Image (spheres, rainbow, N blue to C red):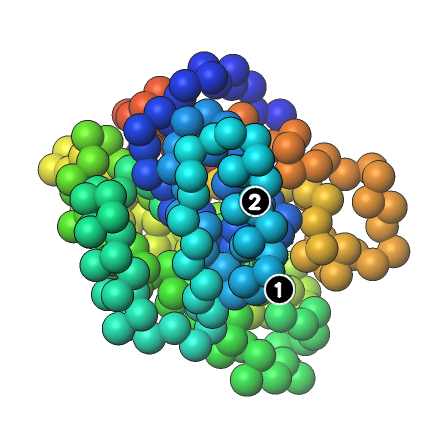
Amino acid sequence: MFEYQAPENLLKDRVILVTGAGDGIGRIAAKTYAAHGATVILLGRTLEKLEHVYDEIEAAGHPQPALVPLNLESAQEHDFIELTNTLEQEFGKLDGILHNAGLLGVRTPIESYDPVIWQQVMQVNVNAPFMLTQTLMPLLERSENASVVFTSSGVGRKSKAYWGAYAVSKFATEGLMQTLADEISNVSNIRSNCINPGATRTQMRADAYPAENPGTLKTPEDIMPLYLYLMGPDSIDINGQSLDAQ
Ligand code: NAP
C-alpha cells in the first residue's frame, strides 16, 4: 500500500473537481477530500447518486460541495466551457481535477469488439478527460499549485487478452498524462500524474471479475492515502509519474 498520513487540513481552501463522484472510488475520494477541507465539485452522470454524496458531505459538516450532473459520453465542448465559466464565477480558481469516471466496456476479443462500445469507452475514458483538462487549464493556472490526477490501470501498462478498448484507453490515459506533464514541467504551477488504484471493491471490479469474492479486495477507503498525497501540496514536485495506490 502507498504510505501517507495526511494532515486533517491538507486540502483546506482548495477547490477540487472529481469525475464519477457518485459511486465507487470517486465517491469515496470526494468524501475524503471534503473531510480534509476541500470544496469538492461532484461531477457524474446519475443525479440521485451525486445528491446522495452531496448530502453525506453536508451531514458530516464538511465544506459545501457543488453538483455537476454531466454525462461524459455525450458532453460537448460547450458543456465544458459552461462548466468552466460557472466554476470561475463561483470559485475563481481550481486546485485539482481527479479524472476518475470510467467505463469498462466489454471483455471481448478485438476481432469481435463492438465499434460502438469502443467509441463510448474512448469517449468517457480519454476524450472527455482531455477536453475537460484543456478547458479548465486557465482556472488551474490560478491556483498556487494545482494537481491533475488521471486514473490508469494495470492493463494501461501491460495489456491482456479481451481487455479491448478499456486497456487501450488506459494506455492513452498514461500518454495524455505524460504529454501534459512534459509540457507543463518547470513552466507551470500545475502537475500531472496517474493513479493505478489496483484491484478495488467496486461495481466495475465486480463486473470485470464476477466470480471473485469482493471480501478479498481492498476497499476504496483503503487506497485513499495516494489520492490525498497527489491532491495536496506535499506532492508539489511530483510530475509525470504513474503511481500505484496498492
Ligand atoms: P465504478 O464503481 O464503476 O464507478 C465509476 C464512476 O464513473 C461511476 O460513478 C459512474 O457513474 C461514473 N461514470 C461512468 N460513465 C460515466 C459518464 N459517461 N459520465 C459521467 N460519469 C460516468 O468504477 P470504479 O471501480 O470506482 O473505477 C473508478 C476508476 O478507477 C475508473 O477510471 C476505473 O477504470 C479505475 N480502476 C478501477 C479499478 C478497480 O479495481 N475498481 C482498478 C483499476 C482502475 P454512475 O454511478 O452513474 O454509473
Check disc 2 and report the residue beneath it.
55
Q: Which residue is at 52% across, 15% downward?
A: 5
Q: From the viewer's perspective, is 227 left or right of 197? A: left
Residue 13 vs 165, above or below: the answer is above
Identify the residue at horizontal 54%, vertical 62% (top origin): 47
- Quarter the C terminus occupies: top right
Mark 1 and mark 2: Cα distance apart in space: 28 Å
Q: Are marks 1 and 2 in contact (CB under 8 Å)?
A: no
SS label for mark 1: loop
Determine the residue positioned at 61% across, 84% down: 114
Q: In which quarter of the image is the N terminus?
A: top right
Residue 29 or 197: which is nearer the viewer? Answer: 29
Q: Does the residue labelled 1 lie within 8 Å of ligand 1?
A: yes
239 left or right, relative to 172? left
Q: Which residue is drawn at 25% across and 57% down?
A: 86
| Depicted 29 relative to depicted 41: above or below | above
Kind of residue at badge 2: Asp
The amino acid at mark 1 is: Leu
User: What secondary structure is marked by label 2?
Assistant: helix
Quadrant in the rendering for residue 244: top right
